[in-house]
Amino acid sequence: MITDAQAADGEVIWQPEPEDAAQTGVGRFAAFLGGQGIDPGTGYDELWAWSVAEPERFWELFARFAGVEFGGTEGPVCTTDAMPHTRWFPGRTLNFARHLLQGHEGIALIGIAEDGTREEVTFEALRHQVASLAAHLRARGVGHGDRVVAILPNVAEAVVGLLAAASIGAVWSVCAPEFGPGAIVSRFAQLDPKVVIAAPGYMLGGKDRDRRTELEEIFAQLPTVEHVIWVGRHTSIPSIPITAPAVDWAQAVAEPAELHFDDVEFSHPLWVLFSSGTTGIPKGIVHGHGGALLEEMKMLLIHSDLRQGDRYLNVASTSWVLWNAVVSALGVGATAVLVDGNPTFPSIDRVWQIAAAERVAVLGVGAGFVHSCAKAAMVPMRDHDLGDLKSLQVTGSPLSADGYRWVYGNVGDIWLASMSGGTDIASIFVGGSPTLPVHVGHIQAPALGVRVESWDEAGNPTRGKGELVVTKPMPSMPLSFWGDDGSRYHESYFSMYPGVWRHGDFIEFTHRGILIHGRSDSTLNRNGLRLGSADIYAVVESLPEVAEALVVGAELGTDYYMPLFVHVAEGVNPEAAREAITRAIRENLSVRYLPDEIVFMRGIPHTRTGKKLEVPVKRLLQGAQLDTVADLGSVDDPQLLEAYADFALGRQSVSP
């Protein structure tokens, strides 16, 4: 364990034990390469350099290492077409569901309801359910390319639905049931689904939420639906009569069937993941069987060091890409822990309770969760037996230096892997390696096979803060956006630097590791000085007086307005918070970072996957109407965002 003094200012706070390296995913992959006559060097940095210098060889051998079974005609690993037109493993076939289900035994899923009810599903039982549901779908005419969508919480039925659809070559998409009907329709209406799997209600915050009225509205706007499967065992709410033929889940999986996997082309569509939908109609991001499988296996085997028999819990709803990672843990032979309802109900300690009770080896949480635990002065290692926990993964937003220190002071001497990726690639750009030291406030390294760089506005590489770009293709870059002619896809990633993926984050490489400075599309640009919102959050949100903050910079004609919205901690006087914020920014950043106004609000608005709504709030201040900046059904607290709209309107009414 590294002392607090050594942990200051980005110093090393954790070191791996050298004797453990050979058993990690990194060590085992390096040994595998050695058996193939390849010597990429002595450490992770050399392994990464080889992986991006020889990407075709890397992905070919990683697929072999991960046990991915290919059919079809052997040929080149990828075409030489420039991004976004590169094709991976052309002519090769496989099936995502086959890799997750075949060859594994033991417990596949552990489902935990909000009331503490617990169930286990073995791999054998999971295979039986997938086979039965797949046969049920086939019997109703569902085949390659047909869309099967679901409105389900984080329960076993959602996993079965995904794997059954994948096994027959259908395309899967899922929304969490707490999404509003408008948010769900704006996603699923694009897909023209043939089958919907839905729960008439769900548990959240200790209450059984009735969704029948919302579902009636949703089904009325999905005219292509030919069949509905109701999942009612997790709620007391009954199903509703609808015009399409419908059955209960028990009927859909009642008939025993032989498990069969359709071999599909490497780039055959697997699922459609949707963007947050805060700036127009949500983008339907299409990933393929092969690309998603390779990237998920790399993220889990290498950058999570997840091993056969491990238990993996990532606090994520079905609408978040991290839920797909939880399901993909099956492909490692690990157990996926599914937590239904609010994972922090009745308190945020519940996550640690579950991690201890289920002997979780790898736990994934958001940075905001860590910061909340720190502010609550929690000491999980004192209150729970976390002896099986070997790694804590943190994503969603940058983790502050204080967050790193809290983990090592209160969770234990474990590997902390901060990572950054996205729904766009169903994977990570930068993340962790269990063979590298952890520096306070820094992500450890770029992910294997990802040529990630920092570029300035002119397209020149820089070691300093710049745009996060990827200069060589990745297998899980989207096949397309659903229904797009390619123009929206190009505009999203390739319009700034032709032929180079620009993700929209600010990144910085230092000798200690990697820093993510927040979204570049919500950059603060005051008088030509580009400020990172993450820098302000790191200072302000570390204050005990502040529960959370949101900063935006809005161009208002010739003026520039940079307010800081603040949700104060319970019992804190706003004026005391104002003084603390101003002092902290002056002392830790500079007067240039001081906001034009500190505005106290009852909360900070987010998407339902936890992202702060910086851009929508900015657009409200610039005069946009609320219904044009965000789909309220995709917002965690619509009434709160309405309060921001009222603030913006009130400010406009008094402006000269």
Image (cartoon, grey):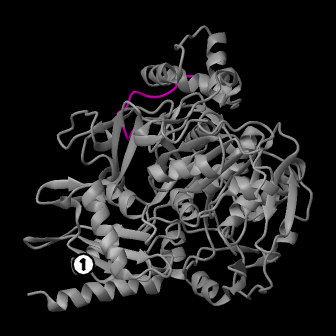
Q: Quadrant of residue 318?
A: bottom right
Q: Main secondary structure of the magenta part?
A: loop
Vertical relation: 151 (above or below) 41: below
Query: Residue 491 in the image: x percent, y percent?
Result: 30, 53
Residue drawn at x 32%, y 50% is: 490
Above or below 598: residue 276: above
Dot 1 crowding, Cα within 10 Å, few <14, some 14–19, many 20+ = many
Front-most of residues 237 and 400: 400
Q: Residue furthest top?
A: 37
Q: Which residues are magenta?
A: 74-85
Q: Position of residue 442 (x, y in %)?
A: 44, 41
What residue appears at the point 85 percent right and 65 percent down from the top-left corner?
Answer: 118
Mark 1 falls on what kind of element? helix
Question: Measuring 21% from the left and 34% from the top, which residue is drawn there?
Answer: 460
Say which quadrant the N terminus sits in: top right
From the top left corner, tell me how far across and down residue 32 is, in percent.
66, 17
Is residue 75 found inside the magenta-colored segment of the image?
Answer: yes
Q: Classify residue 162 by image quadrant.
A: bottom right
Mark 1 sits on what residue? 621
Asked if 274 appears above or below 84 in the picture, the reply is below
**Could you say where residue 188 lies in the image, as x and y percent from the top left?**
54, 70
Q: Residue at x 54, y 74 (%)?
A: 184
Mark yes or no: residue 169 visible. Answer: no
